[in-house]
Image (spheres, grey):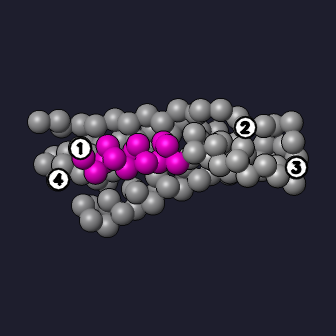
Amino acid sequence: MIKRLYLINGAADMGDITKYTWQNTNSQELLKFYQRNVVTPCVLTSVVMDKIGMDVIRQSNAMQSVCIVNVSSMAAITPIATWSQHCSAKAAKEMWHRCMAEESATQFGAHSLKVL
């Protein structure tokens, strides 16, 4: 039985930091960027939590039996000129995982899932 689970989400790439936000007009490039930097890590975390993490939380009496570490930066909360792709991806991942922690707290108790 797994007693503790740690998930670490690292950064994939910065995106195109040579363009101003209004110059990001190629939807295919944006979709590929968000697929790599937001959708894939969020879905991967959700799959791991659904298949393993929720069982660890249910079976463990330990506080914070599951911990998700997001490698992030101030870019998640601070706008930076020409970094719109990077900043928005960081913010999206951060909020996705905070929502997951909030849902876990509602279902299993305040300290069942820790997101850093």
Q: Secondary structure at mark 4?
A: helix
93 left or right of 84 in image = left
Residue in the image at 17% along x and 36% along y:
2
Q: Amino acid at mark 1?
A: Ile
Earlier in the chain: of badge 3 and badge 4, it is 3
Q: Is residue 2 above or below residue 97?
A: above
Q: Which residues are magenta?
A: 39-51
Residue tagged 1: 52
Q: Amino acid at mark 2?
A: Gly
How far across and how far down the image is residue 48, in percent? 32, 43
Q: Which mark is residue 58?
A: 4
Dot 1 and dot 2 residues touching (CB under 8 Å): no
Earlier in the chain: of badge 1 and badge 2, it is 2
Residue tagged 3: 23
Looking at this view, name the residue that lies furthest to the bottom. Answer: 106
- Distance, label 2 to label 4, CA atoms, is 38 Å
112 left or right of 2 in image = right
Q: Secondary structure at mark 1?
A: helix
How far across and how far down the image is residue 39, in percent? 52, 48
Q: Amino acid at mark 4?
A: Arg
